Image (spheres, rainbow, N blue to C red):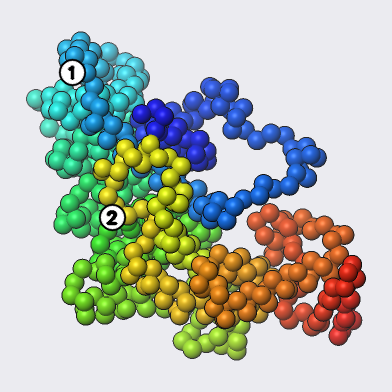
Amino acid sequence: LNSALPTGEAVPTEHTGIGSQFFPHASSMVSRLNSSASAATSSPTPTPATLNAPEPTLTEMEELHRSLPLFLRANRVSYLSLKSVVAHRSSHPPDPEDVEAMKTQLLSHFVSLAKVNTGDENTDAEMRVYCAYSYPAVVLLLGPDNWQGELKECFMRLVNPNYGKPDVDEPALPPLPVKRCLASSLHTVAHILGPEIALADILPVFKEYFFRDTDDSVRLNVIRNFPWLLSLHPPAMRNDFLGMWSEIVEGEDLLGARKRSATNPMLLNWRQRDYVSRSLPDLLSVLSPVQVHRFVWPILQTLLVDTVSLVGEDAEWSIPLLLRAYCAENVGTEAASAKRWSAEKCQEVIAWLKETILGLSKGSKVNGENGITAKFGSRQLYCRICASVALALRFGDLERHQQWDMKYPAMLKLAASSDKTYSPYQTLNPAERKHLRRLLVYDLLPPALDMKDDRVTNVRLTLMKILKQMPADIKDLASVSEVLQELEDEVETWESFNGGEQKPIRQPDHPNANAGGVIVRMPPKDAGYKVKAVKSGEEHISESRAAI
């Protein structure tokens, strides 16, 4: 089991692996205390040798794997870790003598931590934190067969200190650190105990005590782990749970806060909205098309136009999964009505992207007289949405052994028995691939290709990058290959015009600077001059129509 599970090294910037599942608040403490870990993860001091060192050469498959954002890979690794732990517990149960010794000699002392009363509130709260911190590991050892009794009582006492008191009916609030620990690991406990116990005992507590909590840390963990808890619900019972989630996300504490004044502190708490964006891909994987359209699509619209660019950038990765869910073969009704429903919903999404992200009115062209009104950042966002759909197609074309998560074969083998859901950016069936390709080629790409004449340099550079990420059959289309060739020639022209003698200038405040602050020497399209560079050996001949 130790060799099968990652410990967080796979995606060092995210909380993944066995440690984060069973000791949810340990990551930061361990990294501070473990000097060897700090030495391994901290960035070395740059030297001239490292600054000028060439970047490592990656294969095409490695570049494709690295094109996925870190949070998608981290979510996948965390989910597989949890499934592996549960599968290993089922196939390799602890020795019955060990379990019996734990129950008779240690469990009562552990449970007493949840109801200790020393007369000192600080000491009592600290004991309860220790109990909540280790609770998932104790549940893993004892398993669902020993849930009824002291183990269940301990959980209820942690959530509600008044639980079991005969003369008190009103619930009491637990210490905040206790609630944060439980919110981090509640989904783990639910999966260890299984759907039957989770539906009866864990999820009702989650709805009552955690779902509407006002603490930021509790709410962030609720948002992050919600897809995994929802997967324990039978599909027919998910609407009520989804309705509560939708109401909370769209409420005044999250997305609704954007509609109020700028002095509202919630307006600045963009991380909660970003957590919603990062949780959507896994949520979309477990919902029906009707549920996706009813609950997720309205929230995704708000996230895509968020004032904080990172929120929109993380939300864009949900668009291919949304369109995949709308595939007629996934709708589940009779063929004629399924195709009609699929076409209507897909066109609704496409029309919204063009009108809201690009600002295109019906029939208008980019940068024409009736051109877009969106800012250049929104035009880049639209290009990246096209790239995410293209990457979904490319990952969908890979064989199972070529997927990036095959670097964890032992973990996948353990999780295979219980992991039956579709994973974001994995293999597509033929109908889904045909559906996504048609939407990309005929609906999404044409407005993007018109941006080849965009007056902002970085928009044209973004367009060139996303066209390079297209599947081979789309990249070979005449309309795509011509635009890509034109943009590559433009970049080559201006690189050769600089002669390689002048290095890019770092001006972080420049409006057209990219993420690294490097301005690429490409002119705006309407600069009033035209340059032709002709290579002949080492010579570069440039001609100008206007004085520069």
Q: In the figure, is residue 451 to the left or right of 493?
A: left
Asked whether 217 or 496 is in front, the reply is 496
Which image quarter: residue 533?
bottom right
Give, as a three-letter code, the residue at label 1: Pro
Query: Does residue 103 appear anywhere in the picture?
Result: no
**Residue 384 percent location from the top left of the image:** 53, 65
Q: Which corner quadrant holds the N terminus? A: top left
Mark 2 falls on what kind of element? loop
**Which residue occupies 72% across, 34% down?**
45
Residue on which disc 2 sits = 286
Q: Which corner quadrant holds the C terminus? A: bottom right
**Which residue occupies 72% across, 73% down?**
489
**Residue 362 percent location from the top left of the image:** 46, 86
Q: Which residue is the extreme one toward the left?
A: 166
For marks 2 and 1, the one nearer the N-term is 1
**Which residue occupies 65% across, 71% down?**
460
Q: In the figure, is residue 20 to the left or right of 341?
A: right
Mark 1 falls on what kind of element? helix
**Residue 33 percent location from the top left of the image:** 53, 22
Q: Residues within 10 Å of mark 1 (few under 14, many from 20)?
A: few
Q: Up-down: is 1 above or below 200?
A: above
Which image quarter: residue 16?
top left
Give, as a three-letter code, the residue at label 2: Val
**Residue 237 percent location from the top left of the image:** 16, 54
Q: Which residue is the extreme one toward the top?
A: 105
Residue on which disc 1 sits = 96
Q: Which numbered disc, 2 or 1, marks the residue closer to the eye?
A: 1
